[in-house]
Amino acid sequence: MTALPSEWFPGHEDGVITPLAQAMLYPYPAPQGDFFMVDGLPRLAPDGISADALRGRVPVLSVGSNRAPLQLRRKFGPGASLPVTAAILHDVDIVFAASLSYYGAVPATGFPSQGARVALNIAWLDADQLSHMHDTEALGIAYDFIRYHPGAVSHGDRPDADDPVFGQPVHGYESRAGVLGFDGKPMAHAAIKAEGRVFPAIDEPSMLSRVQAMGQPLPEGDDTPLEDWITAMQASRSARDEVMHRMEAIALQPQSMPWDILDTEAGNPEAYL
């Protein structure tokens, strides 16, 4: 087995991410610039990826873990091969969704925020990869498939930036549950940096602790460690559903979004809930 580089694959044992790391290290490290996934491993492209390498693929902006080689390998397998290019999301910040993934993380999603600029990346997917990505996002249940308005996503300074491949619509995924609104406003994900950020930012373990505390009052002396709570969430869909029901009480829905929701279906979304 090829050893996975720890820079991009933290928290792994024997080539597999540990359950606690999968939750607490979300959304995982990602390269700053362009890269290719080649046989499940990132190959950096410091000179950029040309438009010719992207033709015939669908550009899908990654706002959370899909930015990361770790997640792309996990979703598409050790044979995963696809191009990924750097991008900037404008007037939207990356915040915590009002949901809990099957692996115990509070996932990231976009929320309008005038003046924000977030460095992200775009996964350029072929038809089969896009269909599988829809399943992994539990499309129609946990997420909507969206198309960003012109100007919401830019591709940076590229020598072939005028090529039509960079002028086509950029897609993405947006949480159907809205975003967590502690104190009436979203909380940004500290692991994903932004310019012009106005929302308070915290990291994944801190948000998981907040969500754990949203439960019913604990008996006196009960100080269940966060790690044990995460393990319990990973083991039980009904327990996750109960937590998400409580999240609904403080969920905020975005307004004046720079995207349109597309009528798209997934083949097997229930497998990833």
Image: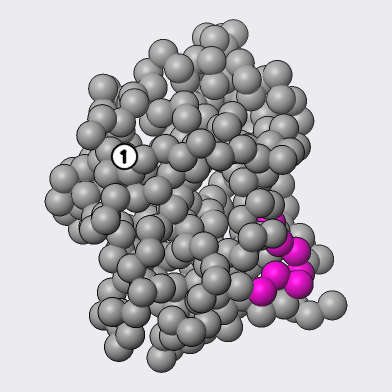
Residue range of the region highlighted in magenta in the rendering? 75-81
Name the side, left or right, on which 197 lies relative to 168.
left
Quadrant the N terminus occupies: bottom right
Q: Position of residue 66 (x, y in %)?
A: 54, 57
What x and y, as percent, mark residue 149?
29, 50
Secondary structure predominantly adopted by residues drawn in magenta: loop
Relative to 215, residue 24 above or below: below
Q: Residue at x 42, y 65 (%)?
A: 121
What residue is pinned by disc 1? 111
Q: Residue at x 44, y 57 (%)?
A: 61
Q: Is residue 17 left or right of residue 259?
A: right
Instruction: Report the front residue among 225 and 213.
Output: 213
Magenta span contains residue 255: no
Residue 96: percent from the left, percent from the top? 41, 38
The residue nearer to you, when weighing 152 against 272, is: 152
Q: Quadrant of residue 195?
A: bottom left
